[in-house]
Amino acid sequence: MSTTPPSRANLNPLGWINPSLLKQLMLPVVSLWVACALLATSAAYLLAGRSTNTSFDRLLADDAKALSAQLRWNDGVASFVASKETADSLVFDSLSLSHYSVHTANGRTLMGDMHLEIPEVEARTDQQAIFFDHTGSSSHATLRVVAQRLQPSPSDEAVWVVVAESKEKRRQVKDEIATAIFLPALIVGFIIIPLFYYSIRRALSPTRQLSALVVAHGDDNLSPLPVEQVPQELQELVAHTNSLLQRLQASVSEQRRFIADAAHQLQTPMAGIRLLVGDMRRIQKADPTQPMDAEVLAQLDEVATRGARMVKQLLAFARVAEDSAAEPEHFDAVEAVLEPAARWRGLALAAGKSLQLENHVDPMQEFMLHGSPVLLGEVISNLLDNAIRYGGPQIKLRLNHHDSTLIVQVQDDGPPLDEYAREHLLLPFWRGNHGLPEGSGLGLSIAQRIVERLGGRFVVIDKPGLGACFEITLPCEVRHLLALEERKPEGG
């Protein structure tokens, strides 16, 4: 039964949870612009309203001063010299009707017909205007009032000049100012937000082109991506991608070469098995009663064993990366190296060889690694196995350290390796001219891969006059046992 891969909409039904890069850039830009626009226009509106009130109050005070100029005092008695028409013209306003009243402190009206209760204030002679709002009149809307008390001398009659106007015209002017502020901002928003959108979309076009280039590469094209037309912010990403592609190409090439070499190496045992089985079938067909040839069976067993060993080594070579990543642990590298040495000492004696251990590592220090101690033990076992099989009679396992780096050497006193052998010894499926058929040429390659997975280095070093010498360097975390003992609580 065939299945259809889910679409993007099915994978992400709520698009806002994982928005596109365009949305992620637009949202803060537009939000910041809207917030700044609202803040700026609100501040401008408030400041404009304050300025409007100040200006209208100043005009209202000027009207009161104009009426005050028409006052006269004769023998301390106040009088208003201008006519009502003149007084009306002095406070005339084309926007709204102004109200005024000129009366003495004891309530005698000199001009005007407005009667307002003036807030109680101390008697003043400096003629300073008093501003207040009045909402008690049922015949008028809320009024803005200015009151000015005039008394040239203490013997003169005190006079109040009061001028009032509706606050409605101030509201109208503020609304006009608000419209003048907000409307252009709104129009600019309809222009600038699409500009933001298309500018950001155009700036992101190189990312879409880069994505198209990656998609166009396909599975078989691992060539580097061009960096000439890539913006500066994406150059580092492209550089890392190209580095990844190069490593991937090298890995794919290595895997293809490995598969080809493995197929080539398996041809020999498979051909031997087919040949031996063919001989057995011909013998059985010629004389069904004749027993199986013991020599042919022994050869078949040898070829099958060699093929099985090679398959096992191939699987081990392919699974090193998986095994090294599975359940990593913190372990003592020195213990992991010494543990297989005890087992291989008896096998070396059985083969007529000696295995010497030289441990120059400080016993009060632990060299800790993160990984698999079993795989590191397999490396040591592999090197000791090769030394017993192909090396000289004297084998040495030497441990040393330089600062926090553990150094392990496996050396024998067999025939020295020539330059060609040292260059090819670590290559998969390469076997030396030792004349032994059971090797697969994968053991040292597996050891090298394991050491590199542990962050170390595996090399063949040249020591004149000696046989093969393999050196492993492992960067470790050093722990001082004495310091650990001092940290333990008493009785622990």
Image: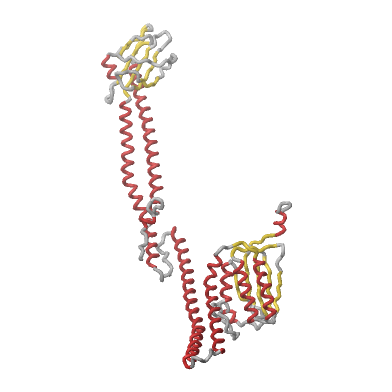
Identify which residue, 228 or 469, lies in the foreground. Answer: 469
Identify whether 474 is placed above or below 61. below
Residue 36 placement (x, y as % from top left): 40, 42
Closer to us: 348 or 483: 348
User: Would residue 465 be seen by someone viewing this image from the given angle?
Assistant: no
Residue at 33% in and 35% down: 178
Q: Residue furthest front?
A: 289
The front one of 21 and 77 is 21
In the image, residue 491 sits, relative to residue 176, either above or below, namely below
Q: Position of residue 460 (x, y in %)?
A: 61, 76
Above or below 471: residue 233: above
User: In terms of image quadrants, where is residue 375?
Assistant: bottom right
The quarter of the rendered structure image containing the N terminus is bottom left
Residue 122, picture quadrant: top left
Q: What colouring method underlies this structural image? A: secondary structure
Residue 393 is drawn in which quadrant? Answer: bottom right
